[in-house]
Image: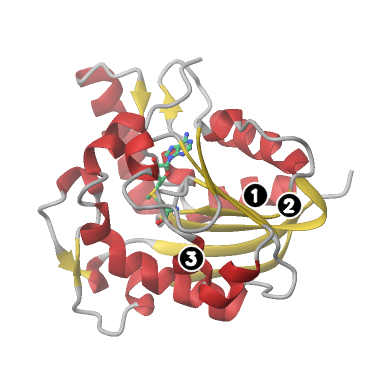
Amino acid sequence: MKTVESEELFNDVSESFGDLYGQFNRNIRTHFVSSILDKKNINRVLDVGNGGTNPEDILSEDIAKKLGLFVGNDSSFDMLTRTKRSIGVSVNSDALLLPFKKKSFDTILIMSMIHHIGFSSEEKDLYSRLRIFLKNLIPLLEEGGCIYIIESTLPRFFERLERYLYLPFYTKILRKKFIPTFMYCSCDLQNILNEYFDYDISEYKWVYELFGSKWEMMAPTLYFKWLKLPVVFSPYKILFYKCRPKKK
Ligand SMILES: C[S@@+](CC[C@H](N)C(=O)[O-])C[C@H]1O[C@@H](n2cnc3c(N)ncnc32)[C@H](O)[C@@H]1O
């Protein structure tokens, strides 16, 4: 199985990523740190699909300074190195093949990454790669540790368009074997996560709710970077999910 499908896409956008989604990501992180993060119990952190973001920008300077370990993982070398690492280390590997020992972390962050796990056209099940990813992740967390997932999701109608127009277009017309993005419908993603985790917090916010004004402009997709629209027209709901692996 080919594992790193989104590498090319992100190597391509690494230079413009900060300009495109810098404000959006800052707004997401502000909400995350103020309302979701357990600030007392965070010491050894793995950030999967890190995108070259430093811990002080994700978690605040105070928290970042006190960390025992910060590992930023990403499959795209260009994304990892688009900024200078201030604290911690960068690990360039696919999220489906993370090279860490069991129980290495008390906190795992997965921010805006799940929709890039991708889909291989040879697979029948859209969710099989996501399930492999989640299964492999759980042993890396120490007892009592916590996983935070922040993910853009689509209402069912848009997910149907994606499934029945975008996927066939990619696989049948462009004849691509790998699709580097697939946004999940909020309820499908939640159902899969609930198979593996018990959650403490599960909250959805429309994109515009994370901005000061509904009329701020943002490109809804990396594929059409030039198409900027007011955030009030963004169809995404952002899932904030704080969870622990289910006890066997
Ligand atoms: C939308 S960016 C989010 C970056 C960062 N987490 C943030 O919130 O700003 C998604 C990141 O996930 C990385 N990524 C995509 N597929 C990956 C995979 N299979 N393994 C590891 N990283 C991956 C991309 O290279 C990219 O840097």
The residue where tag 2 is placed is: 197
The residue where tag 3 is placed is: 58
Ligand 1's image quarter is top left
* Sequence-wise first label, 1 or 3: 3
Q: Is residue 107 above or below residue 90?
A: below
The residue where tag 1 is placed is: 193
> Residue at left 47%, top 45%?
49
Q: Is the distance from the Cβ of mark 3 to the nearest ligand 1 atom less than 8 Å?
A: yes
- What amino acid type is highlighted by mark number 1? Leu
- What amino acid type is highlighted by mark number 3? Ile
**On the rendered image, what quadrant is the C terminus found in?**
top right
Task: From the image, state whether disc 2 or disc 3 is nearer to you.
Answer: 3
Residue 27 locus on image (x, y percent): 38, 73
Q: Is residue 174 visible?
A: yes
Q: Which element type, helix, strand or loop, lies under badge 3?
A: helix
Task: Give the alpha-carbon distance from disc 2 to disc 3, as whole Å.
Answer: 23 Å
Picture mark count? 3
Residue 217 locus on image (x, y percent): 17, 70
Task: Give the alpha-carbon distance from disc 1 to disc 3, as whole Å.
Answer: 23 Å
- What amino acid type is highlighted by mark number 2? Phe
Residue 172 locus on image (x, y percent): 26, 18
